[in-house]
Image (cartoon, helix red, strand yellow):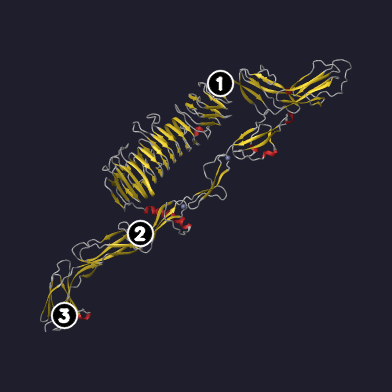
């Protein structure tokens, strides 16, 4: 929009206070340049004042240039290409400035119509583009009340290359093919009239690769129907920014799944689609959504509880961002995931993460295709309904959670540590029947599934203070746990740990060493019981050197031999000379807590400090590391320490862990919320930043967003008068500042080409010149109109009204006098007393004659005399007193007319003089 920007200081209060009224007045002031249909033929034609030029070409069509053209009629077919244009009727419409096609008709027909086309289209290809800055508004000024209202185009195809098109007419574009490359298209049809679609095509395809589309309708945004034959009912979207608000459907291909299934397709490979609909957002037999380097961004939401937002029979979705936040009946579906309704042979392609509970709502089939993956996360549940076929053999299907299948399902191929439930039976992912082992714990029960015959290894929890682990109590009691292990039966098992109080060894004096070669009792024990084993000679006699040996079980380390609570050796092999009976206990410690974390830990992007990284129960981050920050996409080392009450029972109770934080993901929107940041206004650049969509950290800073430029609203015209100049001001619709100002010069010169004329028997209309203060002529019938008085033929005084119009106002009255035709003296005959004067008769449009005579050639006032005669006389006798003296004569005609009720004489010019001497 390059318009003359002027800087006028206007009080803001005045702008705000007066703009609405002024704007309204301006809208009323816009007047049509043409008030009848513009019919175009095979012949070139133009009318600059009306703002159009038509140039046919040899190949069956032509170029129509509209320059501030405003056509308003009470019919449809405002632009009519007649059948002298070749069959193709291939028309390019070039838009310059603001153009309007307005009809007051409700008759069912098109604003732009090619006579060789018929509904369904055999001719009429329209290409629309702007030159400079061009727009086209197609509208009805009579409120639309029925679906039989005029629509935008009738023809075979419409291609919008550029320019701005806006319409309130329902069914705005009717043709076979609709394409949009760039520019903008706004269709808002009345909300209270049902069944009005934005873009309605009898066939397809609809191709959108760019531009901005904004449709609000009471039916569909795009409605692609069919004549019944095999037609390409395809909607292809590879770019653009599409906003649809529809009372019924967003993109709707009629007969989806019934008529021509191979053609009823919505292909989305790019662009941004935002659709709100009462019933369905996307509806077609085939829906393929697949992004490349650009991910299509699709946001759909409907209010219906009967339909999902997207309905298709054959569907594939990959590399796309789809969200459907307001689908009432699909609440369980994770918001980030692809959300689909799967019909008879529907398929879901791509990667699908199931992190919550997801119940597929309808029958059909669910396919993980080659290269795709479905992952059920821990604690998530995927439920496949009865009648749905689940086919996962070609893709990757990882089940770490729970997959609930109908009893009728076949075997499902998946991997992972999850389970599959079918009716009463439970399987692991290799499809063995499994049974639950439930361990009762103070911290809550845990359940793990095992197949029949598997060895189940149990890990006892640390015992309470003063207690030691004694063993397991199993239910049913047919299960025998030996050394923390048992073989899984074909039924569910519940286990509980049993503890006992630690018995202090009896404190007493050392028994005396029996003398001689008698047997000595060396009693050994193990603490804790599962820590290890002890070996000792089977028979010991006094005086013998003996060695007892402590051997740690896997996961344990020997620490010391004790006797009466005192350490007697820290060697596993303890050698001494047998004397007295002894009671020795081998002490073991578990190497590490059973839930020791791994040394590598990957955390979500939202985890910014070590303190937020998860650890198993009983573990904490060391104080020196807990406040370390973790940069996005990198890692830090931190030590985890086991601080549960029994920490001293372990050899090692700390571990150094490398924590890796996932990388940030930049959200697409530029934000302006920071201090010193601000959104762009019309005239100033914005300063903003982007954030990570996961953790909210700033990713790019100091982003300059160029000023948007003013958006000129409707022009407000202050008309010029004969006294003052006027102006046309467009105020910005965003900030109210004047976006452009064009001065209209005052009118200061209104005059007739001449103010008098002589009666000639014909009507006399003198031309009028109207000029502005810059001496530029104003245009007749645009800037002013003329009204000549009636008649203007016979002698009289007449008025011409000049009425200013268009950008001017005021009026001026000009006078024009038609005088009678004169005559001449034919003869003067001297007589005794004076003269007889004779003249030529003037037969038309006079009242009489005036003869004037004088002794002075200059007819000085005191010397002259004037006599009158009626119009039927042609001679007059005049008496003079002075004899033998020269007299001068002249004659004129006159006509008496009424001016404001009074007689007024209009005279012709005087005749030539005649000189005669009076007799002696
Ligand atoms: Zn982040
Ligand atoms: Zn502005």
Could you tell me residue 331's position as x and y percent?
Answer: 52, 33
How packed mark 1 is, by other alpha carbons closer than 10 Å (few <14, some 14-19, many 20 or more), is some
**Disc on the earlier residue, 1 or 2:** 1
Label 3–label 1 contact, CB within 8 A: no
What secondary structure is marked by label 1?
A: loop
How far is disc 3 from disc 2 in space, using C-alphas?
A: 58 Å
Q: Nearer the viewer, residue 317 or 50?
A: 317
The residue where tag 1 is placed is: 431
What secondary structure is marked by label 3?
A: strand
The residue where tag 2 is placed is: 808
Quadrant of image for the C terminus: bottom left
- What residue do we see at 65% from left, 28% from top? 444
The residue where tag 3 is placed is: 887
- Please indicate whether residue 392 sits to the left or right of residue 762 in the image: right
**Disc on the earlier residue, 3 or 2:** 2
- Please indicate whether residue 234 sits to the left or right of residue 59 in the image: right
Question: CB at mark 2 closer than 8 A to ligand 2?
Answer: no
Could you tell me residue 463's position as x and y percent?
Answer: 72, 27
- Please indicate whether residue 834 sits to the left or right of residue 533 in the image: left
- What residue do we see at 13% from left, 84% from top? 884
Question: Disc count in the image?
Answer: 3
Residue 23 sits above or below residue 901 on the image: above
Label 3–label 2 contact, CB within 8 A: no
Could you tell me residue 473's position as x and y percent?
Answer: 69, 20
Which of labels 3 and 1 is toward the front? 1
Question: CB at mark 3 closer than 8 A to ligand 2?
Answer: no
Q: Nearer the viewer, residue 901 or 636?
A: 636
How far is disc 3 from disc 1 in space, using C-alphas?
A: 147 Å
Q: Which mark is residue 552?
A: none
**Disc on the earlier residue, 3 or 1:** 1
Label 1–label 2 contact, CB within 8 A: no
């Amino acid at each position: 929009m390059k318009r003359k920007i002027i800087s006028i200081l206007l009080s803001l209060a005045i702008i705000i206070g007066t703009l609405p009224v002024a704007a309204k007045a301006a809208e009323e002031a816009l007047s049509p340049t043409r008030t009848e249909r513009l019919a175009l033929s095979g012949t070139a034609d133009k009318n600059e004042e009306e703002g159009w030029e038509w140039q046919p070409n040899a190949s069956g069509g032509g170029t129509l240039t509209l320059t501030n053209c405003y056509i308003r009629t009470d019919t449809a077919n405002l632009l009519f290409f007649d059948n002298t244009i070749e069959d193709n009727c291939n028309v390019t419409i070039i838009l310059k400035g603001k153009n309007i096609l307005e009809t007051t008709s409700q008759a069912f027909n098109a604003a732009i119509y090619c006579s060789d086309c018929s509904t369904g289209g055999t001719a009429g290809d329209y290409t629309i583009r702007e030159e400079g800055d061009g727009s086209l508004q197609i509208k009805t000024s009579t409120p639309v009340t029925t679906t039989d209202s005029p629509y935008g185009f009738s023809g075979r195809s419409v291609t919008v290359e550029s320019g701005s098109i806006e319409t309130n007419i329902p069914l705005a574009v009717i043709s076979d093919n609709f394409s949009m490359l760039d520019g903008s298209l706004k269709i808002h049809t009345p909300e209270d009239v049902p069944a009005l679609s934005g873009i309605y095509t009898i066939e397809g395809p609809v191709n959108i690769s760019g531009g901005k589309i904004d449709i609000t309708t009471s039916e569909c945004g795009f409605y692609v129907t069919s004549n019944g034959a095999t037609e390409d009912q395809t909607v292809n979207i590879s770019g653009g920014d599409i906003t649809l608000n529809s009372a019924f459907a967003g993109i709707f291909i009629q007969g989806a799944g019934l008529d021509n299934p191979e053609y009823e397709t919505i292909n989305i490979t790019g662009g941004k689609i935002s659709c709100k609909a009462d019933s369905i957002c996307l509806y077609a037999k085939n829906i393929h959504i697949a992004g490349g380097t650009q991910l299509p961004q699709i946001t759909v939401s409907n209010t219906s509880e009967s339909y999902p937002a997207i309905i298709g029979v054959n569907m594939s979705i990959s590399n796309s961002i789809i969200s459907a936040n307001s689908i009432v009946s699909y609440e369980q579906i994770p918001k980030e995931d692809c959300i689909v309704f799967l019909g008879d042979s529907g398929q879901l392609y791509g990667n699908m993460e199931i992190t919550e509970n997801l119940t597929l709502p309808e029958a059909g089939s669910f396919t993980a295709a080659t290269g795709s993956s479905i992952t059920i996360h821990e604690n998530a549940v995927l439920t496949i309904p009865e009648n749905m076929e689940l086919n996962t053999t070609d893709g990757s299907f990882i089940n770490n959670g729970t997959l609930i299948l109908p009893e009728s399902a076949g075997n499902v191929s998946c991997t992972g540590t999850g389970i599959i439930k079918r009716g009463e039976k439970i399987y692991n992912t290799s499809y063995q029947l499994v049974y639950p082992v439930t361990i009762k714990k103070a911290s809550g029960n845990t359940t793990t599934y095992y197949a029949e015959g598997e060895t189940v290894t149990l890990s006892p929890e640390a015992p309470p203070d003063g207690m030691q682990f004694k063993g397991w109590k199993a239910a049913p009691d047919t299960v025998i746990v030996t050394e923390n292990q048992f073989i899984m039966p074909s039924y569910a098992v519940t286990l509980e740990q049993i503890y006992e109080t630690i018995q202090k060894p009896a404190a007493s004096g050392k028994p005396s060493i029996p003398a001689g070669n008698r047997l000595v009792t060396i009693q050994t024990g193990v603490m804790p019981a599962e820590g290890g084993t002890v070996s000792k000679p089977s028979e010991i006699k006094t005086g013998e050197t003996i060695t007892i040996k402590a051997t740690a079980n896997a996961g344990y380390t020997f620490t010391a031999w004790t006797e009466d609570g005192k350490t007697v050796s820290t060697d596993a092999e303890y050698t001494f000379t047998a004397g007295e009976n002894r009671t020795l206990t081998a002490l073991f410690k578990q190497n590490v807590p059973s839930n020791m974390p791994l040394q590598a830990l990957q955390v979500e992007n939202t985890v910014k400090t070590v303190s937020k990284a998860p650890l198993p129960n009983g573990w904490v981050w060391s104080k020196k590391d807990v406040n370390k920050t973790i940069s996005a996409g990198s890692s830090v080392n931190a030590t985890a320490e086991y601080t549960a009450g029994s920490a001293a029972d372990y050899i090692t109770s700390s571990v150094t862990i490398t924590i890796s934080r996932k990388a940030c993901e930049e959200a697409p929107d530029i934000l302006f919320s920071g201090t010193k940041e601000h959104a762009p206004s019309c005239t100033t650049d914005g300063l903003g930043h982007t954030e990570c969509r996961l953790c909210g950290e700033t990713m790019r800073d100091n982003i300059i967003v160029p000023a948007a430029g003013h958006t000129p609203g409707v022009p407000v015209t202050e008309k010029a008068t004969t006294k003052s100049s006027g102006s046309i001001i467009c105020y910005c619709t965003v900030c109210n500042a004047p976006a452009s100002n064009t001065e209209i010069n005052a009118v200061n010169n209104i005059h007739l080409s001449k103010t008098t004329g002589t009666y000639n028997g014909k009507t006399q209309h003198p031309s009028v010149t109207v000029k502005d203060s810059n001496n530029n002529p104003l245009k007749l019938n645009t800037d002013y109109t003329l009204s000549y008085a009636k008649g203007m033929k016979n002698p009289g005084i007449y008025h011409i009204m000049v009425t200013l119009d268009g950008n001017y106002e005021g009026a001026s009255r000009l006078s024009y006098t038609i005088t009678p035709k004169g005559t001449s003296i034919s003869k003067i005959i001297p007589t005794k007393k004076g003269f007889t004067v004779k003249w030529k008769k003037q037969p038309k449009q006079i009242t009489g004659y005036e003869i004037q005579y004088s002794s002075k050639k200059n007819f000085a006032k005191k010397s002259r005399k004037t006599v009158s005669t009626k119009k039927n006389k042609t001679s007059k006798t005049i008496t003079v007193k002075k004899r033998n003296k020269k007299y001068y004569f002249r004659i004129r005609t006159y006509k008496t007319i009424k001016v404001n009720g009074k007689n007024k004489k209009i005279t012709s010019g005087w005749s030539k003089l005649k000189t005669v001497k009076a007799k002696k």
